[in-house]
């Protein structure tokens, strides 16, 4: 056996190990993604149970629940569908068909919401303001941890983020600024709608302010202290070289062809 052949075999073994890690990376990303979504809905359910208002991103679905009595999970699915339609209107030919998967993710997120709200219904209710604020603080931590798991998986954004990105792409405004305006507009729409239809604050309250202020800060703290462990488990940045990924594909193709021959 020549040195070239030995070197090629060694290279192939390295490539196959890398390819195995890439497959493992996908599975882990999917696990992290859906666990993150589920954890987020746990936090949302706790905030609903506190009855102090929900986070800005959940304010409109909960407003639909408060006004029309539609179960919050179904209201969440409906809201996601509306946001996907908004993206289609804004982007037109630039809208990518793969982003229709946001509807499917919205359905999953909606059913997670229904399940977690059902689970939270077994928690004891309290009129004690301190306990309710504590529940809201816990919900902020849980939502932040869910985002911490969900975002780096980079599978498919929720429809809210997709709509924000569409507005950012069309207007040229930075995504972070669009997000702030988007959150504020959802809170205003929710507040005005609740005041007009039910003569109360409904989905908006002190908990909405707590979530708006704390979730981002808590997420930053968690990311600072635990992102290295998360990224190592997800193999993030391990396949950043496109030439390495191309080599994996080429070796796999050549080997498959040689087996067929």
Image (tube, rainbow, N blue to C red):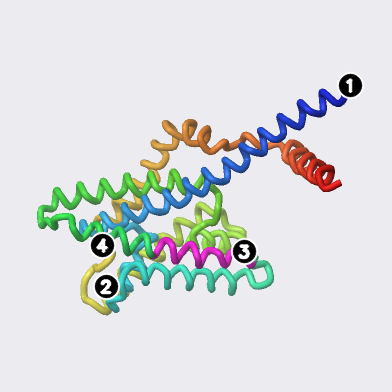
Q: Around disc 2, counting alpha carbons within 10 Å, would you say few (fewer than 14), some (14 to 19), or many (20 or more)?
A: many
Residue assigned mark 3: 98
Query: The residue tagged with tag 1: helix, strand or loop?
Result: loop
Between the C-alphas of marks 1 and 4, the distance is 67 Å
Question: Which residue shows up at 44% across the image and 37% down it?
Answer: 223
Q: Nearer the viewer, residue 186 or 98?
A: 98
Task: Indicate left or right for 178 with 206 as reference.
Answer: right
Q: Which residues are magenta?
A: 97-110
Q: Are marks 4 and 3 in contact (CB under 8 Å)?
A: no
Asked whether residue 103 is drawn in magenta, I would say yes
Between the C-alphas of marks 4 and 3, the distance is 32 Å
Query: The residue tagged with tag 2: helix, strand or loop?
Result: helix
Q: Around disc 1, counting alpha carbons within 10 Å, would you say few (fewer than 14), some (14 to 19), or many (20 or more)?
A: few
Q: Nearer the viewer, mark 3 or mark 1?
A: 1
Q: Taking the image as drawn, is residue 192 in sight? A: no
Say whether disc 1 or disc 4 marks the residue closer to the N-terminus.
Answer: 1
Q: Nearer the viewer, mark 1 or mark 4?
A: 1
Q: Is residue 5 above or below residue 127?
A: above
Task: Indicate left or right for 22 with 61 as reference.
Answer: right
Say whether disc 2 or disc 4 marks the residue closer to the N-terminus.
Answer: 2
Query: The residue tagged with tag 3: helix, strand or loop?
Result: helix
Query: The residue tagged with tag 4: helix, strand or loop?
Result: helix
Q: Nearer the viewer, mark 2 or mark 4?
A: 4
Disc number for residue 2: 1
**Where, quadrant-wise, is the N terminus in this rendering?**
top right
Residue assigned mark 2: 66
Q: Nearer the viewer, residue 198 or 159?
A: 159
């Amino acid at each position: 056996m020549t040195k070239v052949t030995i070197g090629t075999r060694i290279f192939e073994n390295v490539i196959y190990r890398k390819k195995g890690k890439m497959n493992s990376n996908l599975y882990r990303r999917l696990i992290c993604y859906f666990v993150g979504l589920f954890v987020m809905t746990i936090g949302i359910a706790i905030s609903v149970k506190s009855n102090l208002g929900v986070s800005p991103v959940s304010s409109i679905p909960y407003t639909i629940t408060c006004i029309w009595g539609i179960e919050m999970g179904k209201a969440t699915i409906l809201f996601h569908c509306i946001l996907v339609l908004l993206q289609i209107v804004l982007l037109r030919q630039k809208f990518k068909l793969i982003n229709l998967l946001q509807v499917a993710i919205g359905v999953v997120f909606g059913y997670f919401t229904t399940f977690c709200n059902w689970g939270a219904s077994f928690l004891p209710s309290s009129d004690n303001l301190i306990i309710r604020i504590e529940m809201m603080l816990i919900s902020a931590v849980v939502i932040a941890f869910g985002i911490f798991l969900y975002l780096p998986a980079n599978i498919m954004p929720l429809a809210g983020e997709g709509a924000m990105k569409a507005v950012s792409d069309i207007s040229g405004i930075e995504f972070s600024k669009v997000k702030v305006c988007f959150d504020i507009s959802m809170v205003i729409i929710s507040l005005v709608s609740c005041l007009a239809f039910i003569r109360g604050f409904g989905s908006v309250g002190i908990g909405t302010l707590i979530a708006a202020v704390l979730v981002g800060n808590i997420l930053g703290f968690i990311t600072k202290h635990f992102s290295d462990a998360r990224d190592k488990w997800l193999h993030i940045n391990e396949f950043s070289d496109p030439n390495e990924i191309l080599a994996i594909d080429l070796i796999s193709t050549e080997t498959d062809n040689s087996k067929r021959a």
